Image (cartoon, rainbow, N blue to C red):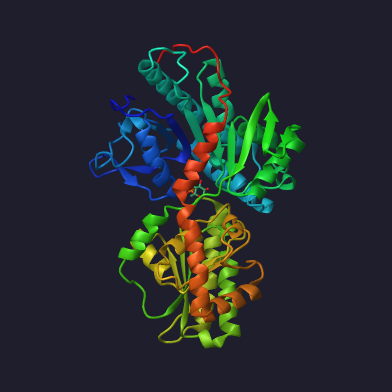
């Protein structure tokens, strides 16, 4: 990886996430092509990795990619990572399924969302998790060697103090073991680096975490990092308590630091934001797509943590208790298919299909149906128009790390007319105080809150939305990323030693 001549050399960033920032697919001619992903992580981190000559390590989203395949360059030059900045992790499909469907989404997803009854504990899928994490770690070590070789070339003197220390930033529950393996090899090979981890889902309480038979290994894996980030203080507190009780760590509560293995692990609450301006621009440009009706909007991956069943029942209760909304208000629920190979997700889809059918059968007339249910993906433009023109957004997860839909809705509310109803069990519930907060399990209360939102006067709606928009526009995804990297900057590099010329 050669830096452009004259380019300021900031610390190279190596991002490690389960998914690469794009999916690789074969076209009709058998050539691999990138199909782009629109996530906030990609929007924020992509340009930083591009500019610092960093790398991104992840699964390319398909098992049709072989080690000898060339990664295609982005369609438009400089619009994405160069092919040599991408290191795809390729594992056998059977192993990957056991890791992804089995351990990640059959065990950690429900457990970390405090739904242990749904979690399956299996030594077989745990083994797959370990193996796949090792694959990611090996690719990261390769990346570190590559970056190291570039730095040694650019800084003639290997003990030059101004030589930047590469930062490895690992993301999410799929990769909780990788850091321990990376640290071990980095120490053996004197590969100076700082290791960071961000968890995008909740971190559960000690009472839940201890149910996992190999909880110590997970904690050890995360503790191998120098900086560990969570969305909110509650998750930091849970993590710190687990480290104290299970690992016997000493904790400096005043500074939110953990002492482990003669090192300091910095634990920080860094709530993620969204690319606010990007959503706002989409909302400004998007044509109208809805009829003249008042829409209560739900947008979620079809996931049992999102509280879809309770939400739909609450809408039914609204129609029953406030018949003045019959014929006038519609619940538009967009459910994006997700993890369709996992049993729990299949069962949920059937339950929702039946529930929607029953409620529509109960209330529909010749020219109106109460629920418009879309099981599928919709374009970003349409989504922005739905967010902009809906009267109410119902964001009522039973548990959610942050929830970005609440933030996207707010960014698209350019007319400041809509009302956000939010669950306090989403990370977003802690900061988006001007939303109407409601416990999603209290179906009567949710119904009453939807009613309250539908009859709220214009001044109050504007006032609440204005405040929500102000906060989200300043604390956007770039702000989040900069906060993490700033914290990282202050962390001391714990892997040091005489610099050695590593053959690459
Ligand atoms: C959550 C997780 C992400 C994950 C996303 C989509 O937001 O925190 O890590 O990528 O869901 O799920 P999927 O299983 O399709 O990657």
Residue 396 sits in quarter: bottom right
Q: Which residue is pictured at 59% across the width and 31% down the height?
A: 226
Q: Which residue is pictured at 73% across the width and 35% down the height?
A: 251
Quarter of the image for the C terminus: give it.
top left
Q: Which residue is pictured at 26% across the width and 44% down the height?
A: 27
Quarter of the image for the N terminus: give it.
top left
Q: Which residue is pictured at 37% across the width and 40% down the height?
A: 47
Q: Nearer the viewer, residue 89 or 203?
A: 203
In the displayed structure image, the side of residue 493 where residue 297 appears, left or right: left
Percent x, y for residue 115? 66, 53
Percent x, y for residue 104? 56, 43
Position of 215 relative to 414 (above/below): above
Q: Nearer the viewer, residue 330 or 148?
A: 148
Residue 408 sits in quarter: bottom left
Percent x, y for residue 117? 68, 53
Residue 13 sits in quarter: top left
């Amino acid at each position: 990886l050669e830096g452009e001549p004259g380019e300021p050399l900031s610390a190279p960033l190596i991002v490690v996430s389960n998914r690469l920032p794009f999916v690789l697919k074969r076209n009709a001619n058998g050539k691999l092509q990138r199909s782009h992903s629109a996530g906030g992580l990609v929007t924020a981190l992509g340009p930083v990795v591009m500019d610092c000559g960093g790398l991104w390590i992840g699964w390319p989203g398909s098992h049709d990619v072989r080690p000898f395949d060339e990664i295609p360059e982005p369609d438009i030059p400089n619009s994405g990572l160069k092919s040599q900045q991408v290191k795809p992790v390729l594992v056998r499909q059977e192993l990957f399924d056991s890791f992804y469907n089995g351990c990640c989404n059959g065990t950690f997803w429900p457990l970390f969302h405090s739904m242990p009854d749904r979690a399956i504990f299996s030594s077989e899928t745990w083994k797959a998790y370990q193996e796949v994490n090792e694959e990611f770690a090996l690719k990261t070590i390769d990346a570190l060697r590559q970056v190291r070789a570039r730095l040694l070339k650019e800084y003639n003197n290997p003990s030059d103090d101004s030589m930047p220390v590469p930062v490895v930033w690992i993301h999410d529950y799929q990769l909780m073991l990788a850091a321990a393996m990376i640290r071990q090899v980095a120490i053996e090979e004197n590969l100076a680096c700082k290791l960071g981890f961000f968890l995008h889902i909740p971190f559960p309480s000690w009472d839940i975490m201890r149910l996992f038979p190999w909880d110590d290994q997970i904690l050890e894996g995360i503790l191998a990092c120098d900086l560990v980030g969570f969305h909110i203080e509650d998750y930091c507190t849970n993590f710190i308590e687990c480290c104290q009780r299970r690992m016997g760590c000493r904790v400096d509560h005043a500074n939110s630091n953990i002492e482990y293995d003669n090192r300091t692990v910095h634990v920080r609450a860094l709530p993620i934001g969204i690319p606010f301006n990007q959503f706002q621009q989409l909302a400004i440009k998007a044509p109208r797509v809805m009829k003249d009706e008042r829409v209560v909007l739900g947008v979620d991956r079809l996931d049992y943590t999102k509280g879809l069943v309770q939400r739909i029942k609450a809408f039914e209760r609204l129609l029953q208790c406030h018949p003045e909304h019959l014929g006038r208000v519609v619940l538009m629920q967009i459910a994006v298919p997700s993890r369709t190979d996992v049993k729990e997700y299949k069962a949920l889809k059937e339950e929702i299909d039946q529930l929607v059918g029953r409620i529509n059968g109960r209330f529909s007339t010749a020219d109106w149906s109460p629920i418009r249910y879309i099981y599928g993906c919709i374009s970003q433009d349409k989504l922005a128009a739905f967010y902009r023109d809906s009267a109410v957004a119902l964001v009522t997860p039973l548990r959610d790390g942050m929830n970005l839909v609440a933030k996207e809705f707010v960014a698209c509310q350019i007319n400041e007319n809509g009302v956000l109803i939010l669950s306090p069990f989403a990370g977003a519930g802690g900061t988006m105080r001007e939303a109407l907060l409601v416990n999603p399990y209290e179906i009567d209360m949710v119904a009453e809150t939807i009613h309250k939102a539908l009859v709220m006067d214009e001044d109050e709606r504007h006032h609440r939305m204005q405040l929500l928009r102000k906060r989200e526009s300043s604390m956007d995804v770039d702000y989040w990323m900069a906060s993490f990297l700033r914290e990282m900057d202050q962390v001391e590099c714990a892997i040091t030693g005489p610099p050695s010329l590593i053959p690459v």
